[in-house]
Image (cartoon, rainbow, N blue to C red):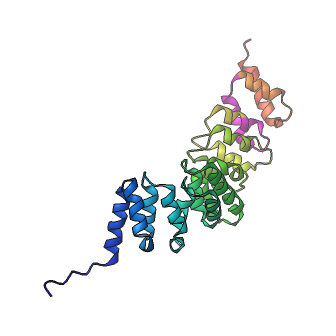
Amino acid sequence: MANAKKYQSPEPELAALAGRIREASADELVALIQEHESKLDVESARQALRNPFVTAEVVGILVDAKQLHGSVDLRRDLAAHPLTPRAFALRIVQTLYWRDLARIGLDTKAPPIVRRAAEQIVVTRLPSLTLGERISLARIASAGIFGELRRENQPRVVAALLDNPRMTEGALSPLIANRSASPEILRVVASSPRWGRRYPVRLALCRNPNTPLAISTRIVASLLQHDIEGLVADKSVPRMVRVRAKELSKRRKPG
C-alpha cells in the first residue's frame, strides 16, 4: 500500500538511539535514558557512560539494568566508571576476565580502589593462566602486577615483561638482585636490547651469582674502575667474576 509506513528493523532504531545518547547534552541524556530505559541495548548503555555529561543518576539506571549485565564490555565499563557505586563496582569486577581486569588496572580514570582490586584479582588468577596468557599479560600489565610477574620462572614471560612500556629500572631491580633468579631469566635480562645496555643493570648482573659466567665476565669489562674495584672486594660476587675484575683493575692502573 502506498500510504503504509515502511517497516524499520529495531537495529537501525537502536543504532540511532546510541548516536543520540552519545551526542546528548546533560538534560537530553537523562531524558533519553529515562524515556528508553526499557529498551536500552548494550551499545546505547556504553555510549551513555562515554558521554561527558553522564550523571550519577544515569549510571544508577544502567546499574539497575540487569538485563544488560550479560555483556562483559558493559560490566567492565561500569566497574571502571568513577560514578559507579563502589560496592557495585567491586562486586562486578570479580566477574571479569583477566584481559578486562588488566585494562581496568591501566585506566587512570577508574577509581584507585577498583584499579587495585582488578590488579589483585589478576594476581590471584595467575597460576590458572596458560603460558600464552601470562606472556600476553606481561606485555600489557600495570605496575601493580609487576611484583608477581617478576617471580615467573618462564623466560618468555620475563622477556615480555621487559618489553612492557610501563616497566622501569626500579621495578626491574628486584628481579636482577634476586639470588633465587634462574640463570635463564638473568640471561634474558642481559640480552634485552632495552635493558641489557643500562649501566645499573649490567652492574647488578655482575653481582648476582646466578648470572651465567660467560655473561658476567664479559660485562665486567664495560664497568667503571671504582665499580670493578668494588666487585673485587665483594666476597658475595662469584670468584671468577672477582678474578676477571682484578685482572682488569690491574691493567687500568697506571704504572
Depicted 176 relative to depicted 110: above or below: above
Depicted 239 relative to depicted 64: above or below: above
Tell me where residue 249 appears, x and y as whole percent: 75, 22
Q: Nearer the viewer, residue 69 or 54?
A: 54
Position of 252 compared to 166: left or right? right
| Residue at point 75%, 41% (across, down) | 213
Is 92 magenta? The answer is no
The C terminus sits in image quarter:
top right
The span picked out in magenta is: 204-224
Q: Residue 229, located in which quarter of the rendered image?
A: top right
Position of 17 compared to 144: left or right? left
Residue located farthest toward the right when viewing the structure as drawn: 235
Residue located farthest toward the left when viewing the structure as drawn: 2
Tell me where residue 64 appears, x and y as whole percent: 54, 68
| Residue at point 51%, 60% (across, down) | 59
Q: Nearer the viewer, residue 239 or 103?
A: 103
| Residue at point 67%, 42% (across, down) | 172
Label the magenta part by its dominant secondary structure: helix
Q: Is residue 16 visible?
A: yes
Position of 130 compared to 180: left or right? left
Depicted 152 relative to depicted 16: above or below: above
Q: Residue 2, located in which quarter of the rendered image?
A: bottom left
Q: Is residue 139 visible?
A: no
Is 223 magenta? The answer is yes
Depicted 73 relative to depicted 175: above or below: below
Position of 181 compared to 54: left or right? right
Tell me where residue 49 appears, x and y as whole percent: 46, 58
Tell me where residue 65 appears, x and y as whole percent: 51, 70
| Residue at point 34%, 62% (across, down) | 19
Q: How many labels were placed on the picture?
A: 0
Q: Nearer the viewer, residue 227 or 243?
A: 227
